[in-house]
Amino acid sequence: MAHVAGLVAAGVHPSPFELCDVVTTTSHKTLRGPRGAMIFYRLGQKGVDKSGNPVMYDFKDKINATVFPGLQGGPHNHIIAGLAVALKQAQTEEYKQYQQQVVKNSKALADELIKLGYNLVSGGTDNHLVLLDLRSKGINGNKTEKVCDHAAISLNKNT
């Protein structure tokens, strides 16, 4: 849920946690933390077997063994501290208002682009992303990305 983690934390975007046993996310982007990532996984009892014995979720050891030492080395304490601050801020009313405003701004941008005759891939937006279909304008997404870079506008093309 990398792109929408901050929106999920603020309750302005549907949460994947009810539907997923494992959720991964970046800690930057809308969560506004340091560059990094988090892995969430279910703990506790998953159900019972045919004999009535509890069946437990077993993600912890598998994920931990895969991440360390397999993919990562030692902890970066400054990143952990920055992440703690970001997660604490995500619990505030100000953060929720900020994320609500992010969505309002995106919807306003989407509405104006539609009024100007641009096609949006999904007909609008429910989050912070606005995806334009520029084919009807005869514009190449790659070229648009480069022109916007020169104007200090950050975007990326999708295919």
Image (cartoon, rainbow, N blue to C red):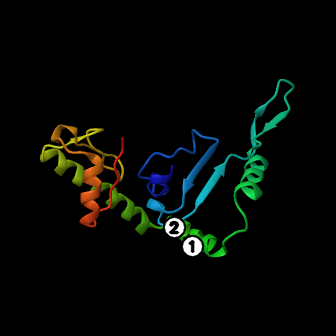
Residue 102 to residue 57: above or below: below
The kind of secondary structure element at disc 2 is: loop
Q: Position of residue 37 (x, y in %)?
A: 58, 59
In the rendered image, which residue does mark 1 sit on? 82
In the rendered image, which residue does mark 2 sit on? 33
The kind of secondary structure element at disc 1 is: helix
Which residue lies most toward the top here?
50
**Contact between labelled residues 1 and 2, with CB atoms less than 8 Å apart:** yes
Residue 83 to residue 147: above or below: below
Mark identifier at residue 44: none
Label 2 Cα crowd, 10 Å radius (few <14 / some 14-19 / many 20+): many
Residue type pointed to by label 1: Gly
Q: Is residue 83 left or right of residue 69?
A: left
Q: Position of residue 113 (x, y in %)?
A: 18, 49
Front-lying residue, 104 or 63: 63
The picture quadrant where one finds residue 71 is: bottom right
Total marks in image:
2
Q: CA distance from mark 2 to mark 1?
A: 6 Å
- Image quarter (top left, top right, bottom left or bottom right) of the C terminus: top left
